[in-house]
Amino acid sequence: MTRAAITGLGTAVGRRVVTNHDLAETLDTSDQWIVERTGIHQRRVGGSCLELGAQAARVALKQAETGAADLDLIICSTCTPDQVFPAVANRIQDELGAACGAFDLNAACSGFTYGLTLAQAQIAAGMERVLVVGVDTLSRFTDWDDRSTAILFGDGAGAVVLAPAIGADRGMLSTYMGSEGRFADLLTCDFGGCIKMDGKEVFRQAVRVMVSASQRVLADAGLSPSDVGAVIPHQANMRIIESAMKRLGIPFEKAATVLETTGNTSSASIPLAMDNAVSKGAVHDGDVVLLVGFGAGMSVAAALLRWGQ
Ligand code: COA
């Protein structure tokens, strides 16, 4: 089967920096509490899904040395689209000058990894270049007077170009998409409303599904936790990442994190963490990289790939 490899990566974040100290001016909270319970120091706010998504996509296309006209498909993962319809993906397509099919998918914070899984399937079916964008503007759906949620979220985008891997052992090794609808009420946002959440229970279930999805993609690829060179998890809470890494038996040092400066950016969090890890030199050619996302639904998705083309 033809494996998809990442050939370009780009990101964008909201322009305005909102620190924990800023939040503590209007909420009964403190920098110390937020850092201890979440690991977040600041988040970025601002921009539409179109603006952030197109900005990230342009960088990814440039890095992949791919013209927009060469794209075969655009998949945009978002749960906070600018409009009910058209899809953000249609507007990104027009903005980039692409001529391919384009659609949005909503799997909340698992959406980017869901998108990678669909892109892998299309490349296995013969497509040459697929753009996957993960973008969310959660600040527009955040109740800034609710200290239990306002401390967590931010706005951002990440995009990757996928193409058939050149090396036989490079690219996507295995993927998994899961859903546990019985937990759907744990994290919701109604039309015209704001994010509502049972934080403690989301925390508990998140660790469980992250671990089981990760174990599943490892088993499907015939690999074990000790083979993993880097983990790029959804960036919701540092303590969730620490617990999941511990249960997986992978040293915490192998986890990429970016939530300290971005907060939870939903669909954008995995590509933002990936970009940070790559620029720090934490991901090397040939490394086995585990991506794992979870979120409202409760949705979960994992992808295992060997880094490089
Ligand atoms: N500042 C100060 N105190 C706060 C606070 C804040 N921002 N938010 C809650 N508290 C208080 C609570 O009122 C509670 O006080 P009490 O003991 O007097 O009742 C106390 O802190 C503990 O609250 P609790 O909800 O048990 O804290 P926690 O350790 O579970 O942390 C979250 C809360 C939200 C940070 C944590 O549960 C979490 O991150 N959950 C996952 C959420 C998530 O990732 N959602 C997105 C998934 S994609």
Image (cartoon, helix red, strand yellow):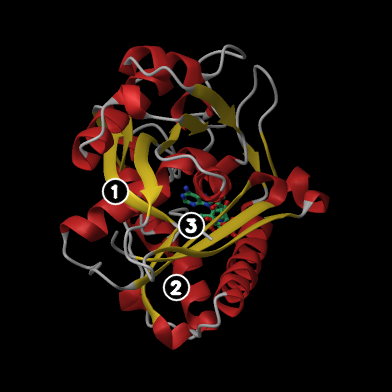
Residue farthest along the left direction in this orientation: 280
Q: Amino acid at mark 1?
A: Thr
Judged left or right of residue 101, residue 259 is left
| Residue located beneath label 2 in the image | 242
Residue 58, image x and y in percent? Answer: 26, 28
Judged left or right of residue 279, residue 162 is right
Sequence order check, earlier mark of 3 and 1: 3
Query: Label 1, label 2: how many angstroms apart (C-alpha)?
Result: 29 Å
Element marked by disc 1:
strand
Residue 69: quadrant of the picture: top left
For residue 2, the mark is 3
Residue 252, image x and y in percent? Answer: 37, 77
What residue sits 43% from the left and 58% below the top? Answer: 38
Closer to the observer: label 3 or label 2?
A: 3
When the figure is inspected, residue 266 is found, relative to residue 165, above or below; the finding is above
Q: Tell me whether the residue at label 3 lies in contact with that at label 1, contact meaning CB atoms closer than 8 angstroms.
A: no
Residue 282: quadrant of the picture: bottom left
Total marks in image: 3
What residue sits 52% from the left and 81% below the top? Answer: 248
Query: Label 3, label 2: how many angstroms apart (C-alpha)?
Result: 34 Å
- Closer-to-camera residue (249/22): 249
**Mark 2 surroundings within 10 Å by alpha-carbon count, few (fewer than 14), some (14 through 19), many (20 or more):** some
Note whether residue 52 is visible.
no
Q: Amino acid at mark 2?
A: Glu
What residue sits 48% from the left and 30% below the top? Answer: 73
